[in-house]
Image: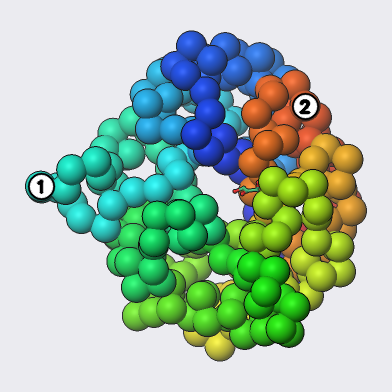
Amino acid sequence: MANRRSVIAGNWKMFKTVNEAEDYAVKFLEEVKDVTDLDIVLCAPFTALNPLKNELEESVVHLGAQNMSWADQGAYTGEISAQMLLDVACTYVILGHSERREMFGEKDEEINKKVQKALATGLTPILCVGENLNVREEGKAAERVSSQVVQALSSISKEDLSRIVIAYEPIWAIGTGKTASSKDAQDMCATIRATLNGLMGLGAEQVPILYGGSVKAENIAELLTEPDIDGALVGGASLDPISFAKLVHNAASVVTQVEGR
Ligand SMILES: O=C(CO)COP(=O)(O)O
């Protein structure tokens, strides 16, 4: 049985000013400072990263961004580079979130370049994949998600692939209060692992696969008892420090019980 780390990552999306982020960090750290059984990540807006670097230094909470450029530097107005994220102590970066794919036109090819850049610079990409409701109703969800995985990870070495995190986020479950059933989430995470197996062989057993979409303190435990769900990417329920800390504690109490994690 694989020995993979569990990851609980909060995606704040476009919420929180610098003051709000600092206030959150103080309250959140107080609640989770002793949690070591899983990796906790806060993916904040760019403007809050530097202040959070100071608040979270040498703590159990890792810092992540929500996007980055595939370019190193240059005339790319409005973009942020991997080097800039490393400079503010980011260790994770969300790539290919469905909101970026749907609203900002990101394509698999571009996401592939970003994943390559993140891995080359030592950032851990949290690659997001997921189908919309139409695709699910057509019975093509597994096909769509596998294709997103294969395209985003094209021409990346097996060794590098072992450093990624994947988040399965069905678009119809994001911000809707409608969580995928743990069985549906497990089935898709197993499909993703099988796809990774095809790309990297046994190394796929080491890759954490997260579920995202209306995850809350109340449903995290059930999701984490599934064998292929190794954590969660949490939007709305990560915005309040006390309730997100509760979610983290609920997750930690399950992962210590699930054999092989
Ligand atoms: O998009 C998500 C995390 O990246 C999920 O958002 P919600 O948890 O608000 O459904």
Which residue appears at 79% of the width and 47% of the height? 177
Q: Nearer the viewer, residue 51 or 1?
A: 51
Looking at the rendered structure, the kind of residue marked 1 is Ala
- How many labels were placed on the picture? 2
Q: Secondary structure at mark 1?
A: loop
Single out the residue that lies furthest toward the bottom.
198
* Foreground label between 1 and 2: 1
Under mark 2, the amino acid is Ser
Element class at badge 2: helix
Q: Quadrant of the N terminus?
A: bottom right
- Choose top left, top right, bottom left or bottom right for residue 88: top left
Where residue 92 sits in the image (x, y, percent)? 46, 46
Left or right of 84, for residue 1: right
At label 2, counting other C-alpha atoms closer than 10 Å, the crowd grade (few under 14, some 14-19, many 20 or more) is some
Q: Position of residue 47 (x, y in %)?
A: 37, 26
Q: Is residue 218 visible?
A: yes
N-term mark: 1 or 2 = 1
- Name the quarter where the C terminus is drawn: bottom right
Residue located at (45% from left, 44% from top)? 66
- Marks 1 and 2 close (CB-CB < 8 Å): no
Residue 159 lies, with reference to residue 94, above or below; the image says below
Q: Measure the alpha-carbon separation of dots 1 and 2.
A: 41 Å
Specify the label residue 75 is tagged with: 1
Question: Relative to 12, is 152 above or below?
Answer: below
The quarter holding residue 237 reads: top right
Q: Quadrant location of residue 246?
A: top right
Find disc 2 in the rendering and name its residue. Answer: 243
